[in-house]
Amino acid sequence: MAPDVWRPDILVSIDFGMTCTGVAWSAAPEWADPKTIMNWPGKASYEMRNKVDTSIGYAAGTQHVRSWGFECDEDDASVDVEKLFKLFLDPSFVDTSGFAPTNLQARQWYRDFLAELYQCIIHFLRDRIARFDAKSIEFVFAVPTTWKSPAMIADIERLIRAAGYGKDPRQKVAITLTEAEAAAVYASK
């Protein structure tokens, strides 16, 4: 007897970018063209944005998340806003500016940002899909073409899982494409 093949009811694709992050999703049984999440915390309900700012805010001088995405206010002295940290996830990236975060800091910011994004995605889908809590979800991530090290990809996957993705037995995480491959697939449609 052949083993059961796991099939998701919902497919969520996440494009983590240097400045902005996009999320698209589709659901069975129709598998309609992917829809983009366009309503984000920190924006009025009538303000549609196809991506959210890739930023995370901490209570000043702490590691306690206070805000993320559009909620981050760089003019608020009580919040330390971190952004533009994607390149620093690559331990081989060299920045000579003298202002670069450590790889450890970038990893924390990535994990914390993805954790906030995860909660947002789950809330968004729960409001739109009947019997959401009984559905299986596959989260698909792409990585930069320059990230070639299998050890680094495995580390990124660990951070994704630490942020909450795949924690439910009905969820899976996949890093299946490079960003260049994902762009080619999108352009071919």
Image (cartoon, rainbow, N blue to C red):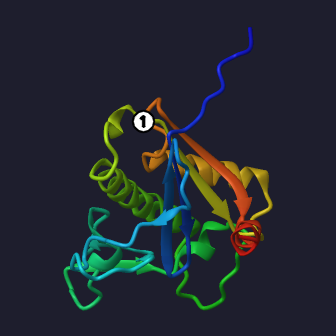
Query: Is 88 located above or below residue 162 in the figure?
Result: below
Q: In which quarter of the image is the C terminus?
A: bottom right
Measuring 67% from the left and 63% from the top, which residue is drawn there?
A: 143
Residue 141 placement: quadrant: bottom right
> Percent position (x, y) of residue 74?
29, 88
> Percent position (x, y) of residue 52?
41, 75
Q: Which of 167/139 is in front? A: 139
Query: Is 66 located above or below residue 11 in the figure?
Result: below
Local secondary structure at mark 1: loop
Q: Which residue extends farthest top?
A: 1
Measuring 57% from the left and 46% from the top, which residue is drawn there?
A: 158
Total tally of numbered discs in the picture? 1
Q: Which of 62/75 is in front? A: 75
Query: Is 129 located above or below residue 109 in the figure?
Result: above
Measuring 48% from the left and 78% from the top, which residue is drawn there?
A: 20
Instruction: Check disc 1 and give the amino acid type.
Output: Lys
Q: Name the residue under label 1.
A: 135
Q: Which of 59/116 is in front? A: 116
Left or right: residue 152 compared with residue 134: right
Dot 1, how many residues are within 10 Å of its Cα: few (below 14), some (14-19), or many (20+)? Answer: some
> Percent position (x, y) of residue 134?
37, 31
Left or right: residue 16 compared with residue 121: right
> Percent position (x, y) of residue 54?
45, 75
Q: Which residue extends farthest front?
A: 30
Residue 156 placement: quadrant: bottom right
Q: In which quarter of the image is the N terminus?
A: top right
